[in-house]
């Protein structure tokens, strides 16, 4: 997974330096796809297929690709933070998760500009490059910095999000909207952010990050406190001290 990400990243870094020359098409309102996305996904798929030829795929651009091995599939976002990428903002990542029988068991999130490789495997811990990661130890929301994603034009839930963020802003030290769900989860795992929440998220945005946060000692759930994030698209991640207070804050705001 790490080797595939590094190989795909070489072209991404080059294309990022020439971002104004990219061929860009519209997938939908506020949702872009570029030639860089497609090239990166092609490289990732080819490299992972060489390593595990029978595994299936769930791809942001390519959809579902069935494999002979029905237990395993790769879940891939070739550029998480595409809008950042296309605007020359150096905050985007390659995300690869490995699912076994419906459970996420491994993941990498690679940020190529800073050469930060976040990686985790179930039962083996979470790491940034070769340094072991732990979620933050903060116990109070008023000391916490949280990450989130704001629903862009064309996505539902604007009014509901404004209720959520108003409640959170009044309770915490700061809120950050950085433009990459995968990196938001990686930052929670690394203790850079104390928590993260978002609605309407896709499986490829969070698959790898779920493993990272859990292996770094954090807790991840949907808004009902259950583990259905991949299906429902709602996610709350934090350390074990802050997860329940944050979840209650969001649920009260949502009514």
Image: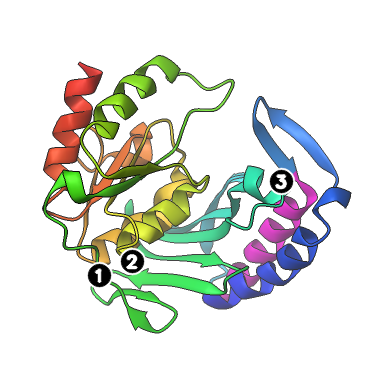
Answer with the quarter of the image where residue 98 lies.
bottom left
User: What percent of the width, then of the height, locates residue 58?
Assistant: 53, 49
Mark 2 and mark 1 lie on one chain; the one further toward the N terminus is 1
Q: Are marks 2 and 3 in contact (CB under 8 Å)?
A: no
Q: Which residue is mark 3?
A: 87
Q: Secondary structure at mark 3?
A: loop
- The secondary element bearing badge 2 is classed as loop
Query: Is residue 173 found inside the magenta-colored segment of the image?
Result: no
Q: Is residue 24 left or right of residue 59?
A: right
Q: Secondary structure at mark 1?
A: loop
From the viewer's side, name the closer residue of 9 and 179: 179
Magenta segment main secondary structure: helix
Q: Position of residue 71 (x, y in %)?
A: 38, 58
The colour mode here is rainbow
For residue 199, above or below residue 176 = above
Tell me which label, 1 or 3, sits earlier in the chain: 3
Residue drawn at x 17%, y 45% is 141
Judged left or right of residue 18, residue 183 is: left
Q: Which residue position holds label 2?
A: 190
What segment carries the magenta color?
Answer: 34-51
Q: Position of residue 124 (x, y in %)?
A: 27, 77
Q: Is residue 208 left or right of residue 132?
A: right
Q: Position of residue 47 (x, y in %)?
A: 64, 71
Instruction: Tell which residue pokes out farthest to the right in this image.
Output: 21
Q: Residues within 10 Å of mark 3 (few under 14, many from 20)?
A: few
Residue highlighted by disc 1: 134
Q: Taking 218 as reference, is 143 above or below it?
A: above
């Amino acid at each position: 997974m790490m080797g595939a990400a590094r190989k795909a990243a070489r072209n991404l870094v080059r294309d990022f330096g020439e971002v104004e020359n990219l061929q860009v098409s519209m997938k939908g309102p506020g949702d872009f796809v570029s030639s860089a996305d497609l090239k990166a996904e092609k490289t990732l798929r080819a490299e992972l297929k060489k390593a595990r030829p029978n595994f299936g795929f769930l791809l942001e651009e390519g959809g579902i690709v069935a494999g002979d091995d029905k237990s395993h599939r790769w879940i891939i976002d070739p550029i998480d933070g595409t809008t950042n990428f296309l605007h020359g903002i150096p905050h985007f990542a390659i995300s690869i998760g490995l699912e076994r029988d419906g459970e996420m068991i491994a993941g990498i999130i690679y940020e190529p500009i800073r050469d930060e490789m976040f990686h985790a495997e179930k039962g083996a811990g979470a790491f940034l490059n070769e340094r072991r990661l732990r979620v933050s130890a903060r116990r109070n929301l008023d000391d916490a910095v949280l990450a989130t994603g704001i629903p862009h034009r064309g996505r539902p839930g604007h009014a509901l999000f404004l209720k959520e963020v108003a409640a959170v802003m009044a309770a915490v030290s700061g809120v950050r909207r950085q433009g990459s769900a995968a990196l938001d989860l990686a930052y929670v795992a690394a203790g850079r952010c104390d928590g993260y929440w978002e609605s309407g998220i896709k499986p490829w945005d969070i698959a790898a990050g779920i493993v990272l946060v859990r292996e770094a000692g954090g807790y991840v759930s949907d808004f009902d406190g259950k583990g259905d994030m991949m299906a429902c698209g709602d996610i709350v991640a934090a350390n074990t001290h802050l997860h329940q207070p944050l979840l209650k804050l969001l649920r009260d705001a949502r009514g």
